[in-house]
Amino acid sequence: AQEDVSKNLVHIKNMLYGTAETEPQADIVVAQLAQELYNSNLLLLLVQNLSRIDFE
């Protein structure tokens, strides 16, 4: 599960900032992502479990 969380966080980062090969997503996609994070209380869960998450 921890590996999946890390992969998904990298995917979200790539959506927001882009990569060497891709541009950042359009504002509407970012707004939808933010709304889903809010609706699912995912942001709160991420903050509560920061110590368990592996970062790059």
Image: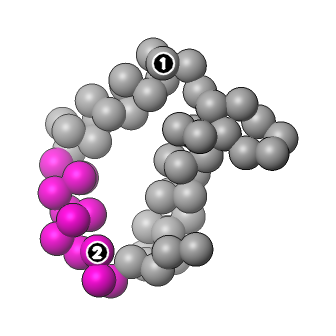
Residue found at the very far bottom of the displayed protein: 52
- Tell me if residue 9 comes above or below residue 41 in the rendering: below
For mark 1, what is the residue? 27
The answer to whether 30 appears left or right of 37 in the picture is right
Element type at marker 1? Answer: helix
Q: Residues within 10 Å of mark 1 (few under 14, many from 20)?
A: few
43 inside magenta stretch: yes
Segment colored magenta = 41-52
Look at 61% across and 46% down and name the residue there. Answer: 14
Look at 29% across and 83% down and name the residue there. Answer: 51
Q: Earlier in the sequence, mark 1 or mark 2?
A: 1
Q: State how the image is colored.
A: one colour
For mark 2, what is the residue? 50
Element type at marker 2? Answer: helix
Q: Nearer the viewer, residue 24 or 52?
A: 24
Look at 16% across and 49% down and name the residue there. Answer: 41
Q: Position of residue 48 (x, y in %)?
A: 16, 71
Main secondary structure type of the part rendered in magenta: helix
Amino acid type of the residue tagged 2 in the rendering: Leu
Q: Position of residue 54 (x, y in %)?
A: 46, 80
Quadrant of the snapshot with the C terminus: bottom right
| Residue 45, quarter of the rendered image | bottom left
Residue found at the very far right of the displayed protein: 21
Q: How many marks?
A: 2
Amino acid type of the residue tagged 1 in the rendering: Asp
Quadrant of the snapshot with the N terminus: bottom left
Q: CA distance from mark 1 to mark 2?
A: 26 Å
Q: Position of residue 16 (x, y in %)?
A: 53, 38
